[in-house]
Image (tube, grey):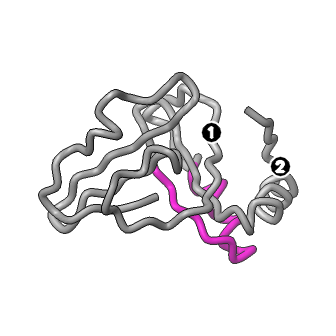
Amino acid sequence: MCRLPAGSALPASLSSGPDDKSVISVTWAPDELSVICPADRVPDGATVEASWRCLRVVGPLDLALTGVLASLIGPLADARVNIVAFSTYDTDYLLIPQVRLTEAVDTLTAAGHRLASA
């Protein structure tokens, strides 16, 4: 997870698109360009927050569904596991700090969620 200054162009390291296993999210906002990408695709000059793991909700999800993220975030918040959530058209993703991954997996499993390795 990283950011670049507001008004930055799409970095060349991201312009070729992901391989078939990568998840890349680029968000332009008035105050920043925020990028979620694999560590080997981090743009030069970016402020980086490293060592996160990505959990993907099996989708595609109907856009009319409610409570999907809440059912994941609630137990993690109760366990005081910090997360970053983002969504695509088809599904939702949670970024979990690597050092909290085991705790997050145990918490989600105890809450009734099934997790599988990619």
Residue 76 is a magenta residue: yes
Residue 57: mark in rendering: 1
The mark that comes first in sequence, 1 or 2, is: 1
Please give the name of the residue rendered at 84% of the width and 52% of the height, measured from the top-left corner. 109
- Which SS class for mark 1? loop
Please give the name of the residue rendered at 49% of the width and 29% of the height, measured from the top-left corner. 62
Mark 1 closeness class: few <14, some 14–19, many ≥20 residues within 10 Å = some
Please give the name of the residue rendered at 16% of the width and 63% of the height, measured from the top-left corner. 6
Specify the quadrant that holds the C terminus: top right
The picture places residue 38, in percent across and down from the top left corner, at: 52, 45
Residue positioned most to the top: 20
Please give the name of the residue rendered at 57% of the width and 52% of the height, measured from the top-left corner. 69
Alpha carbon distance from label 1 to label 2: 14 Å
Amino acid type of the residue tagged 1 in the rendering: Val
Between 85 and 14, the one lying in front of the other is 14
The residue at which mark 2 appears reads as 112
Residue range highlighted in magenta: 69-86
Between 67 and 77, the one lying in front of the other is 77
Q: As drawn, is 88 to the left or to the right of 32?
A: right
Residue positioned most to the front: 44
The picture places residue 105, in percent across and down from the top left corner, at: 80, 55
Classify 105 as above or below 57: below
Q: Do tag 1 and tag 2 residues touch (Cβ < 8 Å)? A: no
Q: As drawn, is 87 to the left or to the right of 12?
A: right
Amino acid type of the residue tagged 2 in the rendering: Gly
